[in-house]
Image (spheres, rainbow, N blue to C red):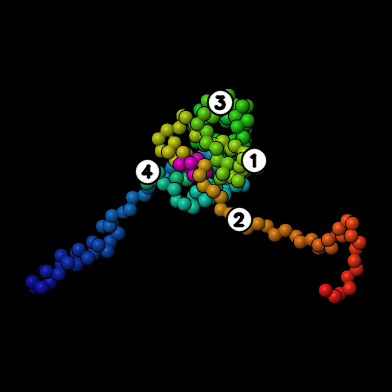
Amino acid sequence: MTLQWRWKPVLLIAACMAMPACKARPKVQPVVSVRIFRDMSSPYAQQLDYRILEFQGANPRLSSGAAIQVGGLNVGETSSVLSNMDDPAVDIVILDSPEDAARFPSLQGEMAHAVNVCAAVLACPANVPALVPSKLGGEKAEAANKFVQYLATAKPEPRAPEPQPTLPQAAPPAQTGQPAQPSTGHP
């Protein structure tokens, strides 16, 4: 009987380790979502989509370990959003050019800290300003600034050039001052 009594604690410990309730659950890190306001019909829209995907593929994190998720805003009226930068939905504004900011007085003060992200959209020597509104703070501001800095420094992956159709080549024209010589087939 003493032999059975000694095995009971061992069996109890083994059963406890096998049960999921006894194991520590991993901490799930929060996700910080960053919303970008941009012109979806911009000549840079498709390239910005690629940069967003590349950024997400790198599994970006804040200093706290929270994941960063970047997405676009689907806002129909550009002028109403950009005229009122107090809108809580706007975390990043990407313009097509600095001249776009002249139409919106609320952006004038924000343009002082805009970052040129033309390298990320293959638009150089154009100036493509991206800015994080000064009203943004905390983890949202850290996440938005991390994405803008990524755009400012990340070069797009080179893509293979599209094949161009080949045209038949014509014979070179005869040089002036020399009569054209017929081809005899001999060197």
Question: In this picture, is 16 found above or below 133?
Answer: below
Q: Earlier in the sequence, mark 2 or mark 1?
A: 1
Disc 2 marks which residue?
159
Disc 1 marks which residue?
42
Disc 3 marks which residue?
108
Q: Position of residue 150 (x, y in %)?
A: 49, 44
Is 147 within the magenta? yes
Query: For the residues carrying marks 4 and 2, which lies nearer the camera in this image?
Result: 2
- Which sits in the foreground, 59 or 12? 59
- Which sits in the foreground, 54 or 14? 54
Q: Residue furthest left?
A: 2
Circle 2 Cα neighbour tier, 10 Å, few/some/many (<14 / 14–19 / ≥20): few
Q: Secondary structure at mark 2?
A: loop
Question: In this picture, is 8 found above or below 74?
Answer: below
In terms of secondary structure, what is the magenta stretch mainly?
Answer: helix
The reply to whether residue 70 is visible in this rendering is no
Q: Earlier in the sequence, mark 4 or mark 3?
A: 4
Q: Earlier in the sequence, mark 3 or mark 1?
A: 1
User: CA gap, disc 4 to disc 2?
Assistant: 32 Å
Q: Position of residue 50 (x, y in %)?
A: 57, 49
Residue range of the region highlighted in magenta in the rendering: 146-151
Q: Residue furthest front?
A: 177
Question: In this picture, is 177 found above or below 97?
Answer: below
